[in-house]
Image (cartoon, rainbow, N blue to C red):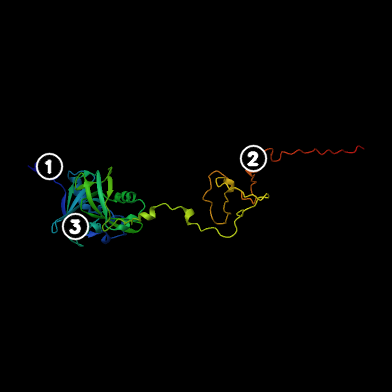
Amino acid sequence: MFSLSLFNHILQPFNMTYRCWSVSMLPGSEREAVDSGGKIIMPPSALDALTRLNINYPMLFKLSNKRSNRQTHCGVLEFIADEGKIYIPYWMMKNLLLDEGDMVQVESVSLEVATFSKFQPLNSEFLDITNPKAVLENCLRNFACLTTGDVIAIKYNQKNYEMCVLETKPGNAVSIIECDMNVDFAPPVGYQEPKHEKKPATEDMMVDPADLMPELSGFIAFKGSGNRLDGKKKKENTDDPLNQVKAAYQRGIPDYEYTLGTIQFLRNIRPVIIDKEIENQDGFKPFAGSGSVLKTKTKKN
C-alpha cells in the first residue's frame, strides 16, 4: 500500500500556487534580459519538487489566473526566489491581469515544438527596423514558448516593442527551444498603405524636348543669299543637304540631332558648292586646266 501511494505521488505533475512579483522587485542587480524574455524565477523548493516528479525537459509551465480566467506559458531561468514567491516579466503580468503580490497557479506542461508563428506589431515604428525578422529571432532566444493571444515585449536599441502573437502552429501553445520555425508578420495596428495619386493622361504623354526650345534669334552663320556673276537666278534644290542651313551652335543648348558614336567639330568653313548648270556645260571641267612645271637649277661650286 505504501509503495503504491509513493508511485502515484511520483507520477503527479507539478502544480503549485505562488505569489507573483515583477522582475523589477527581485533583490540584487537589475536584470533587463529577464524582463524582456519569457522565463520566470522560482524558489529552490520548486526545483527539489520537480526533480522528484516525472516531468519532461526542458521544464515548461502554464501560469493561470483563476480570477480572470487568463493563462500563458513560460520557461524557468533560475531557482533563487524567496520561498512562496515567483518573479515573472512585467508583460506577462499584464497578460494575466495580475498586480504585485497576487496569487498565480504554476503547473508543469509538455508542449509541441513550433513550426510556424505570426506576429503583429502594436506600433508602426517597428517597420523602421532594417531587418525585423533577424531582430525578432535574436530576441526570442530569451523565450521558451509562445502562446496565441499573448502580447510579448522585445527590446532593441534601448527601445521596447510590443508584439501580439496572432497564430502558432501546431497548437495554441508551442515550445520554441531548438526548433526550425517560420515567422510571418501582419501589418502593424493602425497602419495604412500610402496612397499614390494617379497622374493625368496628358502628363504621361512623351514630349519632344526640341519643341520646348526657344526660337533662335540674332546672328546665324551662312544664312544669307548669293547672286550669280552672269546675272541668272540660281536654282535652289531644297533636297540638297548642302543647301540646308543649320542653326549656329549656342552654348547651353544641347544638340538633339546628335548621333551616338560620332564626333562633331565646329568650324567656320563654308562647304564649296559647285553649280550644276556650269558643270553640265560641254567641255567644262573644274580644275581641268594645264600647268607648267617650275624647274630650278642649283649652281655648282
Label 2 close to label 1 by CB (< 8 Å): no
- Where residue 184 sits in the image (x, y, percent)? 27, 48
First in residue order: circle 2 vs circle 1: 1
How many labels sit on residues?
Answer: 3
Amino acid type for the residue under numbered disc 3: Leu
Instruction: Provide the residue designation for mark 3.
Output: 96
The Cα atoms of the two marked residues, 2 and 1, are separated by 130 Å
Above-or-below relation of 112 to 207: above
| Disc nearest the viewer among 2 and 1 | 2
Question: What mark, if any, has residue 280 been given in the picture?
Answer: 2
Residue 152 sits in quarter = bottom left
For the N terminus, the image quarter is top left
Nearer to the camera, 192 or 162: 192
- Where residue 168 sits in the image (x, y, percent)? 22, 47
Nearer to the camera, 127 or 191: 191
Residue 253 sits in quarter = bottom right
The Cα atoms of the two marked residues, 3 and 1, are separated by 34 Å
Question: What mark, if any, has residue 42 been given in the picture?
Answer: none
How many residues crowd around disc 3 within 10 Å: few (fewer than 14), some, or many (20 or more)?
A: many
| Disc nearest the viewer among 3 and 1 | 3
Image-based side of 7 in relation to 141, left or right: left
Numbered disc 1: secondary structure: helix
First in residue order: circle 3 vs circle 1: 1
| Disc nearest the viewer among 3 and 2 | 2
Amino acid type for the residue under numbered disc 2: Asn
Image-based side of 265 in relation to 209, left or right: right
Instruction: Provide the residue designation for mark 1.
Output: 7
